[in-house]
Image (cartoon, grey):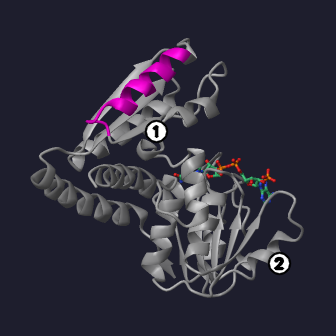
Amino acid sequence: MILIDGKKAAAELREELRKEVVELKNKHNKVPGLTVILIGDLTPSQIYVRNKEKSAKEVGLKSEVIKYPDSVEEKVILDKIDELNKDDTVSGILVQLPLPKHIDKQKIIEAINPSKDVDGFHPMNVGSLSSGYESSVPCTPLGCYLLVKKIEPNLSGKKAVIIGRSNLNGKPMTQLLLKENCTVTITHSKTKNLKAECLEADILVAAVGIPELVKGDWVKKDAIVIDVGINKTDKGIVGDVAFDEVSKSARALTPVPGGVGPMTIACLLKNTVECFKRSQL
Ligand code: NAP
């Protein structure tokens, strides 16, 4: 069984990006810039943002974090986004989710200029992805996709099964694999006989949020299994896949932690660099 090392893949991607940023700086005399807006003092959000800032600096991006208290008015955020949309030194804007209840998440997402939407959540980018046009792709599914491609560069004709249909993970993953000519089944909480669906998969992606949902006998021999889940349990953080069981049948499997997670931030940096490159055309 191949243990898909997300930490190593993310380090390789960051190194590629670091070299690319040096080249871009030589060519354009400026570097891509990422601005993150952080609202409130939720500890996980603060940790994510700190990691994003550290990684952005590591690859040579200009990085800025703008912090607001929980009580900030929606209009203040919308005005700041408007300012950042017009700022040529900002290639990518990310508003860290979740947001306080009084702020309309969709309004915030739609306020970001799609060409600076490094999260790939703007409806225009969602539409572009499903129409097969170039766009920012949400970071976690992009990371999953890159990990699958490392194991199996030619995915044409493969059967992919995705568990979970969120806008964040399942739906964009479907589009990425369709583009690669996979035959894709997307499953969810109302799917009948999930095990039977999973047993069809050459590529199985679990993005559910239920600890160890996918058992060893749900996975075809030689399947590539990508575990997106991050679940806090009594025995620590586990994924949506029962790792010990599935590692006996799968051809390749991502661990949790150390699989998809590290790729998510690396893909945010990749999206920032891509937004910058498109803005220079
Ligand atoms: P979400 O928005 O809660 O979506 C979960 C999906 O799973 C839904 O489509 C739901 O179906 C489906 N589902 C729930 N119970 C199911 C069941 N018994 N059988 C089949 N499908 C079922 O979650 P998300 O934001 O996509 O996140 C999923 C997991 O990934 C979470 O553990 C999250 O922490 C993790 N995550 C990890 C990263 C990373 O960087 N590694 C990033 C983001 C999220 P319905 O649509 O029918 O409700």
If the image is split into quadrants, where does the C terminus sit?
bottom left
| Amino acid type for the residue under numbered disc 1 | Asn
- Give the dominant element type of the magenta stretch: helix, strand or loop: helix
**Which segment is the magenta one?**
75-90
- Kindly tell me whether residue 227 is visible in this rendering: no
Q: Is residue 221 above or below residue 23?
A: below
Q: Nearer the viewer, mark 2 or mark 1?
A: 1
The quadrant holding residue 47 is top left
Pointer 2 or 1: first along the chain: 1
For label 2, the residue is: 196
| Amino acid type for the residue under numbered disc 2 | Ala
Position of residue 223 measured from the top left corner of the image (x, y, whole percent): 62, 82
The local crowd at label 1, few if under 14, some if 14 to 19, many if 20 or more residues have their Cα within 10 Å, is some
Q: Secondary structure at mark 1?
A: loop
Position of residue 251 measured from the top left corner of the image (x, y, whole percent): 56, 83
Q: Is residue 132 left or right of residue 16?
A: right
The residue at 26%/45% (across/down) is 32
For label 1, the residue is: 113
Q: Is residue 246 left or right of residue 77?
A: right
- Kindly tell me whether residue 186 is visible in this rendering: yes
Closer to the camera, 25 or 82? 82
